[in-house]
Amino acid sequence: MRFKDWVRRHTAAYIRQGEWFFLPAPGLTAAAQLLFHNEPLRRGGGKPHICEELYRVGGTTVYVCGRYPNGLTEREYHDLLTRQPMARKWTWQLMRRAPRVYVRGRIRHADHKTVVLPFWHEVQMNTETQSRAMRNVAFLD
């Protein structure tokens, strides 16, 4: 890798892997029972980045299925079930929309070199999702 390419992916402020930026959060502590191991980090239906350790805080609980890949809030979900009772039989998964996510350890992805984070880093998605073309994409974890 050329030096100028390396600089684009690693600075004092962040480390980048694909669409994800990892911002140092060295003072963070997380209780062991709240950690997830080898947890996928993904945007939409793409290949996930696998995080050795992941800790998430906050966000909005959403119900996700094939027909609603960006999720429905609890109110939207219950409204849908009132209108379409058969929707209860769809394969729903409870997830968090836009939580604060922290990772440490090895971050792996099939298309990128593995990144090793020795302490906690906050995960930020590339801001391209704020563009008009990406307005229907949600960060689900």
Image (cartoon, rainbow, N blue to C red):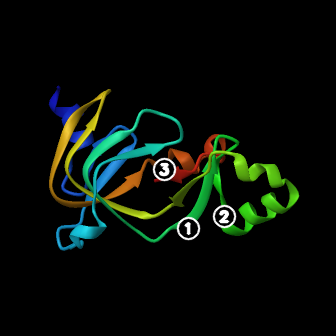
Q: Which residue is mark 2?
A: 73
| Whole-percent x, y for residue 3 in the image | 15, 32
Q: Amino acid at mark 3?
A: Thr
Q: Amino acid at mark 1?
A: Thr
Q: Distance between the Cα atoms at labels 2 and 3?
A: 23 Å
User: Mark 1 falls on what kind of element?
Assistant: strand
In percent of the image, x 20 and y 73: which residue is there? 29
Q: Name above or below for residue 114 compared with residue 91.
A: above
Count of marks, rendered view: 3
User: Mark 2 falls on what kind of element?
Assistant: strand
Among all residues in the image, which is located at the extreme right?
83
Q: Distance between the Cα atoms at labels 3 and 1?
A: 20 Å
Callout 1 crowding tier (Cα within 10 Å): few <14, some 14–19, many ≥20: some
In percent of the image, x 17 and y 26: which residue is there? 2
In percent of the image, x 63 and y 54: which residue is there? 71
Q: Which residue is mark 1?
A: 60
Instruction: State the image quarter where residue 110 is shown.
Output: top left
* Contact, mark 2 vs mark 1 (Cβ under 8 Å): yes
Q: Amino acid at mark 2?
A: Thr
- Give the quadrant of the N terminus: top left
Q: Distance between the Cα atoms at labels 2 and 1?
A: 7 Å
Q: Which label lies toward us, 2 or 3?
A: 2
Q: Name above or below for residue 97 compared with residue 8.
A: below
Which label number is shown at residue 127?
A: 3
In percent of the image, x 26 and y 37: which residue is there? 108
